[in-house]
Amino acid sequence: MKAVIQRCSRGTVTVSENVLGSIDYGLVILLGVRKDDLETDADFLTQKICGLRIFNDEKEKMNLSIKDVNGSALVISQFTLCGDTQKGRRPSFIHAAPPEIGKKLYEYFIEGLKKEGVPVASGEFGAMMEVELVNDGPVTFVLDSKQ
């Protein structure tokens, strides 16, 4: 499972001109689920993201977690994170989870964040979405449950 996390001052996801989710201060999380991912991969990323100290303290040092700052998460499914661009010019998505597995683990990940006390908004799994955010910093990290 791969996640691109971006610290933001606000974020919004829209589908067909309807706002499905929005947050203020927190993280926009783009989540890619691979076909060999399990709930343990989602658990790993949940714990890592909830504990990662990437928010500034009073001295402007990255020393606080999303929970410490009472931040929210906007979680967006993004199978293209599992794309393979090693050969040719057209990405291959053979490593991405099939929709029924991907959706299940996407929803499991969201529930894991909620259990940790992080307020969560989300997009619509499998939909064409428009995601807007104001990246705060900018601060962006790529996390991989397999590394």
Image: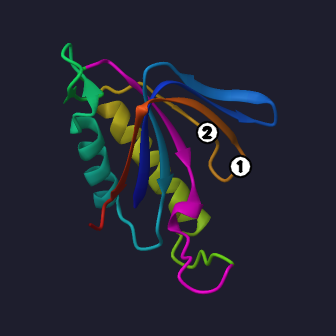
Tell me the residue at 31%/50% (across/down): 45
Percent x, y of residue 46: 30, 44
Residue situated in front as seen by the camera: 68 or 120: 68
Q: Which mark is residue 127?
A: 1
Residue situated in front as seen by the camera: 110 or 67: 67
Callout count = 2
Q: Is residue 31 above or below residue 131?
A: below
Which amino acid, by three-letter code, is at mark 1? Ala
Percent x, y of residue 133: 57, 31
Q: Residues within 10 Å of mark 2 (few under 14, many from 20)?
A: many
Tell me the residue at 31%/33% (across/down): 115
Image quadrant where residue 16 sits:
top right
Q: Is residue 29 above or below residue 96?
A: above
Percent x, y of residue 108: 42, 48
Q: Secondary structure at mark 2?
A: loop
Q: Residues within 10 Å of mark 1 (few under 14, many from 20)?
A: few
Furthest residue to the bottom? Answer: 87
**In the image, is residue 82 part of the stretch drawn in magenta?**
yes
Percent x, y of residue 140: 40, 43
Tell me the residue at 36%/22% (across/down): 71
Mark 2 and mark 1 residues within 8 Å of each other at the beta carbon:
yes
Q: Secondary structure at mark 1?
A: loop
Q: Which mark is residue 83?
A: none
Image quadrant where residue 79 sits:
bottom right
Image quadrant where residue 55 sits:
top left
- For residue 147, side relative to residue 111 (left or right): left
**In the image, is residue 9 part of the stretch drawn in magenta?**
no
- For residue 40, side relative to residue 91 (left or right): left
Q: Which residue is mark 2?
A: 123
Name the colouring of the figure.
Answer: rainbow
Question: Which range is magenta?
Answer: 69-89
